Amino acid sequence: MPDFCAAYGCSNRRSLKTRARGITFHLFPKTEKMRRQWELALRRDGFVASDRTLLCSEHFRSEDFDRTGQNVRLKDGVVPTIFNFPAHLQSVCVSLTNNNSRCIRLIYQYVIKCHFSFCYCKLYNVVYYSTF
C-alpha cells in the first residue's frame, strides 16, 4: 500500500521519485500532546492520525531537521508549519498585547490548542501570537 502525505492538498507519496527530489516522510509523534498539535496544524476537521500517518518534509522548515546522522530526522518538539491551504482554511495572524486584553479574554474562551508562543482558536480560525 502506498504511503501518501496527510497534508491538505499535498500529493506527495513515498516513492523513488520523491526520494530523488530529497523529500522525506515522517510519522506522526507517538506522544498524545505532540500528535494532537500536528493534527491541529493540518486543519482537517475531525482528522485523527493513525500509527502509519505520514507528513512529508515539505511541511517543515529547513531548521526543523537534524541532518547530522545517516537518516534525516525531525528535531524534538517540531510542529509542521508550511501548508498551501485553500482560502476557507487560511488563518489570520495577529499579535496579542496587553493593549487588547478585552479581545484576548474573548478569544481565549475558544482557544483549543496552545503551542509555545501561539494559540489556535478554532471558532475564529485564527492563530494568535503572544507577545507578553
Image: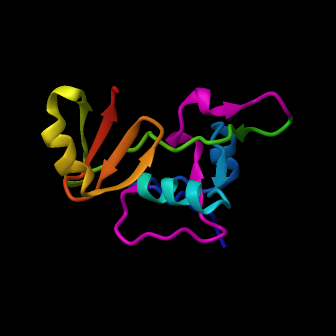
Q: Is residue 87 visible?
A: no
Image coords of residue 107 (percent x, y): 21, 49
**Residue appearing at x 68%, y 61% in the figure:** 30
**Which part of the image, by quadrant, shows the C terminus?**
top left
Which stretch appears magenta? 42-69
The quadrant in which the N terminus is found is: bottom right
Q: Is residue 39 left or right of residue 64?
A: left
Please give the name of the residue rendered at 63% of the width and 64% of the height, measured from the top-left corner. 3
| Apparent side of residue 10 relative to residue 131 in the rendered image (left or right) | right
The colour scheme used here is rainbow
Q: Nearer the viewer, residue 14 or 90?
A: 90
Give the quarter of the image for residue 51.
Answer: bottom right
Q: Nearest the camera: 26 or 107?
A: 107
Asked if one can make out residue 131 in the rendered structure from this viewpoint, the answer is: yes
Q: Please tell me which residue lies in front, 108 or 39.
A: 108
The question of residue 54 being in magenta is answered with yes
In the figure, 1 relative to 25: above or below? below
Q: Picture quarter containing residue 42? A: bottom left
